[in-house]
Image (cartoon, rainbow, N blue to C red):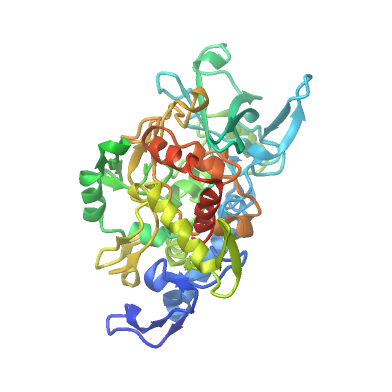
Amino acid sequence: MALTGCEDNGVMNIQEMEVPDGYTLSAGTSTIFKNSSYAYDTDADWVANIPANSIRFTHGDRLYDNPMNSGNGLGPVYAGYSCGSCHRNAGRTKPALWTQTDTDPDGTPIYGSGTYGFSSMLVYVTRKNGAFFQNYGRVIHDQSIMGVTAEGKLECRWHSQQFRFPDGETYELVYPEYTITDWYANYGNTNDHINPDELFCTVRIPLRHVGMGQMMALDHAEIEALAAKSNYPEYGISGRCNYITERGVLQLGLSGNKAQHADLTVELGFSSDIGVTNSRYPEEICEGQSQMLEGSMMGLLYDKLEITTEEMEDVDYYLHGLGVPARRLGSNTTQVTYKGRNMTEREYIAMGEQKFYEAKCHLCHVTTLHTRPRGAKLLNGTELPWLGNQTIHPYSDYLLHDMGSEIMGVGLNDNYVSGLARGNEWRTTPLWGIGLQEKVNAHTYFLHDGRARNLTEAIMWHGGEGYASRNLFAKMHKEDRTALLKFLESL
């Protein structure tokens, strides 16, 4: 991307950008043209070309990736030892949900937490009435520093079922059955063990950190207007906003699988995921639990905060400053065969895009949004005007949609409430960058818990408001389905 100058206010002029042939801008001035394993982990030109911005970005990048240890704040219990341990290359580290750890006597493979120092997943637990278990909180921390007992370990057994498209092609879906083992304590002030019949457990694998800055700069009025008009009764679609109270203020939720956060959760991530205390979360996540004493015996001190607000804002800066991979339109010379006729790869991808619209995927995966004039503001007040007044293509409306409970008798309903989002409601996943996930992170596990092993399975898990699009996709000719998938891989 060639940039010939900036406007007087420091905001880059999109009209002065040269777009290489075969690409299209995904995120305005934050678009990058990189298709390697670092496609998610490259700074935008408004960062790279301004020395002060680059310095802050680099410092935040180090804090994001550098492994923590018990000497500089890790633990006593945690989920990952750095942001980058779960978000490798700012993407989705392969989750332990697909790493076999044991085998049942009947030969059933067991997957789960393992002993690798991180598991690239968050394990949420509640009682069936929505209350937390005393002595555990909302997340089971399945990792711990040496000499400290982890809160529990997750075991996962996958159940599979074969299905058939109308044209005869078969596909398979799998869903997880979770078991918590090695609970470190009983709950409440009783000697009772946690009854599995009282337990709801849901798991989240990492999100791609693509377009985080643009998401935080979104025009909220545009999102709320989308919610007001997102009513397509002929397809059973009706999206709505999530609102969440953070820092004592009711705000529009945009971040997270259920749009349950109003920011990028840097402070929460350091606290809950890594066990690093900070000004917003000054207590250890296992405060009052036996792990505190165990940590003391291993030399941990609890007399000061373990990361500063300024350092956390640099991590926030890094996330906001990441570039978004350009959409790859395909070659004008490479030939492919589609339904018995030859065409260029670019024409083939365009055909897949047409099928995307025919399946009505765009009603939720909205192609074009805009950022507000002043851009985004970081957690400590720094403003980023470079993110302002941009036309972006995230392929999401950032709204909640009912994704159903009917498929395989479970659907995508995880019975976990987040803000206004019910268990069966999920934020529309932004699709930009999705076609590079395998290159960046060497796997194609999708959806909130990684149950979809490829894009076809991800589509076929769409129930509820996504059921009409799922069926339109299923009824397509196989070559049309393949073309649609090729289009998704171009994003």
Occupied quadrant, residue 218? bottom left
Rendered location of residue 186, percent (x, y): 57, 18
- The answer to which of 480 and 328 lies nearer the viewer is 480
Q: Is residue 154 visible?
A: yes
- The answer to which of 129 and 435 lies nearer the viewer is 435
In the shown orientation, is residue 353 left or right of residue 108? left
Rendered location of residue 296, percent (x, y): 62, 38
**What residue sits 26% from the left and 44% below the top?**
230
Rendered location of residue 3, percent (x, y): 42, 84
Q: Is residue 191 positioned above or below 367 on the image?
A: above
Q: Is residue 216 positioned above or below 251 on the image?
A: below
Q: Is residue 142 positioned above or below 31 on the image?
A: above
**What residue sits 44% from the left and 58% below the top?**
353
In the shown orientation, is residue 439 left or right of residue 396? right
- The answer to which of 470 and 245 lies nearer the viewer is 470
Occupied quadrant, residue 4? bottom left
Q: Is residue 447 visible?
A: no
